[in-house]
């Protein structure tokens, strides 16, 4: 069978992801699994807000997933503080809290350090700090956290059909999930069919893509479901250490290869990260939105599917002009653990190829 080459989009499933022994030192000692990271937060609200007649205030970073924020607006009064991945730390002067407020601290793209939040928390013991480690759930920061609560959407970095985790570094009571997520079987089916498609089986891509989209829409509507039986049982068997090693290797190599041809129309958001951290993916910022869209469309035409983390629109934004501008120029290049160095080399070559064509076109227009 001729294998189909593509890079990016949703995870598939392979037994190669498993360890022989069921031992995993990366997970917290005590935790609860929900279907999504959003469900963790919504259930935490139900736990903390049982006897109050008003919504709790939740402070979110201005550079966030707007779909995530929109869902939370049904349960919380949302406030914004400025936090951009182009800066080393949040603008704490924009974080104006009252006693009893909840603050979501996000390890953006998995390359942030914990010290700034640790220092801030030591001066604000009247609030509840929740850390979001979705971009690197097993970093040193996550493992050494002193926040009240920590969450992560595990399915962002692991090959599982669903799964949000919540734990309390301060050993505070955790919310409990209800029944198993009904969308998980559809999502797992999509993952298995994608593996078969990539391996060369005679399966239409449209079939597994339809299941992916439908299951994601259903997961988005879930508020208190538990992770699937598959996720809760397979989690301790996944080779997370190897995943992290490959992901870090791929990001390092991609950044090294594209740095050979530095270009004025793009720049990487980061080129280094703290010890004990692994970047979510390779993240670049383009000079302008038109350049970003041209690059993205070119990569898609080459079967490379780069997502945008995260779009903001005039109708759905944090009202931070810097975050809105960045959302129009940022692009995530998939370089996670699924891919070999040959795959990464191929992506880097396409990346350089696009900018070479871009330069040639600009020269021809000037010459004309």
Image (tube, rainbow, N blue to C red):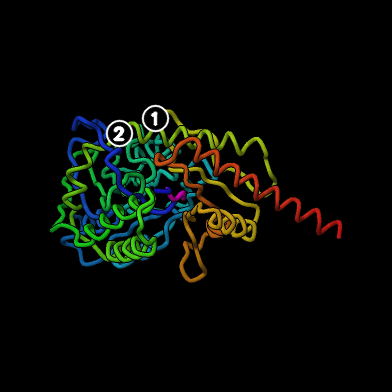
In the image, taking residue 42 as reference, residue 319 lies left or right, namely right
Would you say residue 66 is visible in this rendering?
A: yes
Q: Position of residue 169 (x, y in %)?
A: 24, 38
Residue closer to the observer: 358 or 317:
358
Would you say residue 126 is visible in this rendering?
A: no
Residue closer to the observer: 136 or 86:
136
For the stretch drawn in magenta, the main secondary structure is loop
**In the picture, which quadrant includes the C terminus?**
bottom right
Crowding at mark 1 (Cα within 10 Å: few <14, some 14-19, many 20+):
few
Name of the residue lying farthest toward the left = 179
Residue at 47% in and 54% down: 309
Contact between marks 1 and 2 (CB within 8 A): the answer is: yes
Q: Position of residue 176 (x, y in %)?
A: 15, 52
Indicate which disc residue 205 carries. Answer: none
| N-terminal label among 1 and 2 | 2
Q: Is residue 163 above or below residue 146?
A: below
Q: Which residue is mark 1?
A: 276
Q: Which residues are magenta?
A: 3-7
User: Could you tell me which secondary element the residue under label 1 belongs to?
Assistant: loop
Name of the residue lying farthest toward the bottom = 315
Q: Picture quarter containing residue 43?
A: bottom left
Indicate which disc residue 143 carries. Answer: 2
Residue closer to the observer: 3 or 249:
3
In the image, taking residue 151 as reference, residue 50 lies left or right, namely left
Does the segment drawn in magenta span residue 283?
Answer: no
């Amino acid at each position: 069978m001729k294998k189909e080459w593509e890079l990016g989009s949703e995870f598939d499933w392979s037994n190669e992801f498993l360890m022989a022994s069921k031992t995993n030192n990366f997970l917290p000692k005590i935790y609860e699994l929900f279907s999504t990271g959003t469900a963790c937060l919504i259930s935490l609200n139900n736990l903390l807000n049982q006897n109050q007649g008003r919504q709790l205030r939740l402070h979110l970073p201005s550079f966030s997933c707007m779909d995530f924020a929109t869902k939370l607006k049904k349960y919380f009064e949302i406030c914004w503080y400025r936090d951009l991945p182009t800066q080393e730390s949040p603008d704490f002067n924009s974080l104006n809290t009252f006693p009893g407020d909840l603050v979501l601290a996000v390890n953006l793209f998995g390359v942030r350090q914990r010290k700034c939040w640790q220092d801030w928390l030591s001066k604000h013991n009247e609030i509840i700090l929740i850390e979001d480690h979705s971009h690197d759930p097993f970093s040193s920061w996550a493992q050494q956290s002193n926040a009240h609560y920590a969450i992560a959407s595990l399915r962002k970095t692991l090959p599982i059909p669903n799964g949000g985790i919540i734990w309390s570094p301060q050993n505070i009571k955790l919310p409990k999930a209800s029944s198993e997520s009904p969308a998980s079987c559809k999502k797992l089916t999509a993952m298995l069919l994608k593996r078969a498609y990539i391996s060369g089986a005679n399966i239409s891509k449209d079939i597994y893509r339809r299941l992916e989209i439908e299951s994601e829409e259903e997961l988005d509507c879930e508020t208190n479901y538990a992770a699937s039986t598959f996720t809760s049982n397979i989690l301790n068997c996944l080779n997370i250490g190897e995943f992290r090693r490959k992901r870090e290797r791929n990001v390092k190599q991609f950044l090294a290869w594209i740095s050979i041809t530095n270009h004025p129309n793009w720049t990487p958001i980061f080129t280094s990260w703290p010890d004990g951290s692994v970047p979510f993916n390779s993240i670049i910022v383009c000079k302008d939105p038109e350049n970003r869209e041209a690059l993205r469309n070119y990569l898609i035409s080459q079967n490379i599917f780069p997502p945008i983390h995260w779009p903001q629109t005039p109708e759905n934004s944090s009202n931070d002009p810097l975050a809105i501008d960045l959302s129009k120029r940022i692009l995530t290049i998939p370089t996670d653990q699924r891919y070999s160095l040959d795959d990464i080399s191929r992506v880097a070559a396409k990346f350089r190829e696009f900018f070479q064509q871009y330069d040639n076109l600009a020269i021809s227009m000037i010459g004309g």
